[in-house]
Image (cartoon, grey):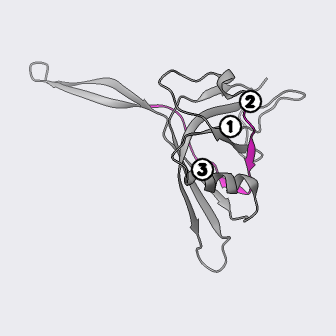
Amino acid sequence: MSIFATAGSSVFIGQALPATSTPFVLGDFAGQSWVEVNWLETIGEFGDESAEVTFDAIGEARTSKLKGTRNAGNMDLVMGIVEDDAGQLALLAAEASPSDFAFKIVFNNAPEAGTPGERYFVGKVMTARERLDTANNVARRGGRVGINSNVVRVPAA
């Protein structure tokens, strides 16, 4: 495999899917009806990061570092506002809901006659803000997804 461009990647939102304390597997996302979120400019970052837990031992004169809880972060989407886009409408509805929703990212990295890499996770749509900047800009919508699960990785094949 080699590096690949973000261009051509896609983001999809599914239905409500409660977060659990056990790690998700690919089968947990079966049966979802996916809706693509169109006109994306930025997908942002996602993936686990461990909290830093420290202990300052007086006799050692050294700070010991441990790994604490894991946090998959927030995925910050930026898109051009399209009032009738089904994916953007689904994001708006998800923001108004207290539920977690299924998300799927499809990369643009399929080998010839193969399938692209995919990522799956569950999260809450925390924001769906509209941003109008200067006159020579596209009206944009920002959507922050607070990820509440592990990220299931499916490699390109």
Q: What x and y, as percent, mark residue 138?
A: 68, 70
Q: Residue at x 55, y 33 (%)?
A: 18
Q: Which residue was labeled with disc 2?
A: 31
Q: Residue at x 50, y 27 (%)?
A: 20
Q: Secondary structure at mark 1?
A: strand
Q: Secondary structure at mark 2?
A: loop
The quadrant of the rendering that contains the C terminus is: top right
Identify residue type, mark 1: Lys
Q: CA distance from mark 2 to mark 3?
A: 18 Å
Q: What x and y, as percent, mark residue 147?
A: 52, 39
Q: What x and y, as percent, mark residue 6?
A: 70, 44
Kindly check if marks 1 and 2 are in contact, taking CB atoms under 8 A apart as contact.
no
Q: Is 36 in the magenta?
A: yes
Drawn side of residue 82 relative to residue 152, left or right: right
Q: Which residues are magenta?
A: 31-49
Q: Which residue was labeled with disc 1?
A: 104
Residue 132 position by quadrant: bottom right
Q: Earlier in the sequence, mark 1 or mark 3?
A: 3
Residues packed near mark 1 inside 10 Å, few (<14), some (14 to 19) or many (20 plus): many
Identify residue type, mark 2: Gly
Drawn side of residue 20 relative to residue 42, left or right: left
Q: CA distance from mark 1 to mark 3?
A: 15 Å
Residue 67 position by quadrant: top left
Which residue is the extreme one toward the right?
113
**Which residue is at the front of the view, 53 or 26?**
26
Identify residue type, mark 3: Ala
Q: Earlier in the sequence, mark 1 or mark 2?
A: 2
Q: Which residue was labeled with disc 3?
A: 94
Residues packed near mark 3 inside 10 Å, few (<14), some (14 to 19) or many (20 plus): many
